[in-house]
């Protein structure tokens, strides 16, 4: 685990701050969460204030230390879940592969770095297919590079739509 487990914390303390969800078996964290919905615990380690992931603390307290370089993965795909039976460890690459396998990665206009909407992609695809303008001109109209227009036209990215 990245850092020591705060000595004042216990499995019982963590359990007292969650509620069981009867349909999924998840233990939903009722305390503070981050912007992605993961439970966080504000505590002190060696007298210094710090923040730890509630799911990471639960996994470490119930299964021992988390290997260096590993993340705690949710088998249930519920960020606020702290049920130890739903938590496992893995490499960041394994976690990313799990996300892709389950179709949870942001795609298209939902991707945080997307500069185009699905409508823009449709227009670019039609303009490139009908050769209305050179791809370099289409690219400058939409504020992207020529390669992006080419890949959209060939359906190498933005495959949906």
Image: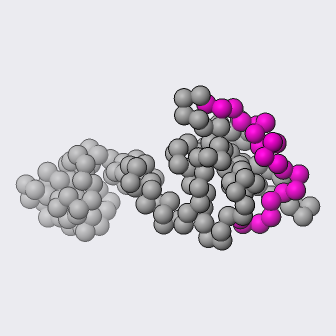
Camera sees residue 84: yes
Q: Position of residue 52 (x, y in %)?
A: 74, 55
Q: Nearer the viewer, residue 86 or 157?
A: 86
Q: Residue furthest top?
A: 22
In the image, taking residue 124 as reference, residue 21 lies left or right, namely right
Q: Nearer the viewer, residue 44 or 90?
A: 90
In the image, taking residue 78 as reference, residue 62 lies left or right, namely right
Q: Nearer the viewer, residue 26 or 100?
A: 26
Q: Residue furthest right?
A: 47
Q: Position of residue 9 (x, y in %)?
A: 84, 50
In the image, taking residue 111 as reference, residue 63 lies left or right, namely right
Quadrant in which the N terminus appears: bottom right
Q: Residue at x 69, y 32 (%)?
A: 19
Question: Which residues are drawn in magenta?
Answer: 1-21
Q: Main secondary structure of the magenta part?
A: loop
Whether 123 is among the magenta residues is no
Q: Position of residue 65 (x, y in %)?
A: 72, 64
Q: Residue at x 80, y 59 (%)?
A: 5
Q: Residue at x 45, y 54 (%)?
A: 99
Camera sees residue 111: no
Q: Position of residue 108 (x, y in %)?
A: 34, 51
Q: Residue furthest left?
A: 130
- Report which quarter residue 45 is drawn in: bottom right
- Report which quarter residue 140 is drawn in: bottom left
Coloring scheme used: one colour
Q: Residue at x 25, y 68 (%)?
A: 147
């Amino acid at each position: 685990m990245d850092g020591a487990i705060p000595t004042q914390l216990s499995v019982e303390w963590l359990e007292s701050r969650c509620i069981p969800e009867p349909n999924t078996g998840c233990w939903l964290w009722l305390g503070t969460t981050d912007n992605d919905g993961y439970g966080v615990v504000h505590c002190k380690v060696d007298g210094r204030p710090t923040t730890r992931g509630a799911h990471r603390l639960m996994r470490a307290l119930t299964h021992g230390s988390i290997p260096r370089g590993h993340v705690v993965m949710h088998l249930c795909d519920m960020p606020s879940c702290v049920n130890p039976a739903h938590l496992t460890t893995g490499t960041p690459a394994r976690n990313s592969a799990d996300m892709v396998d389950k179709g949870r990665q942001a795609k298209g206009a939902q991707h945080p770095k997307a500069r185009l909407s699905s409508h823009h992609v449709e227009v670019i695809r039609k303009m490139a297919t009908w050769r209305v303008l050179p791809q370099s001109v289409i690219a400058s109209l939409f504020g992207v590079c020529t390669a992006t227009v080419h890949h959209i036209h060939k359906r190498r990215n933005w495959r949906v739509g």
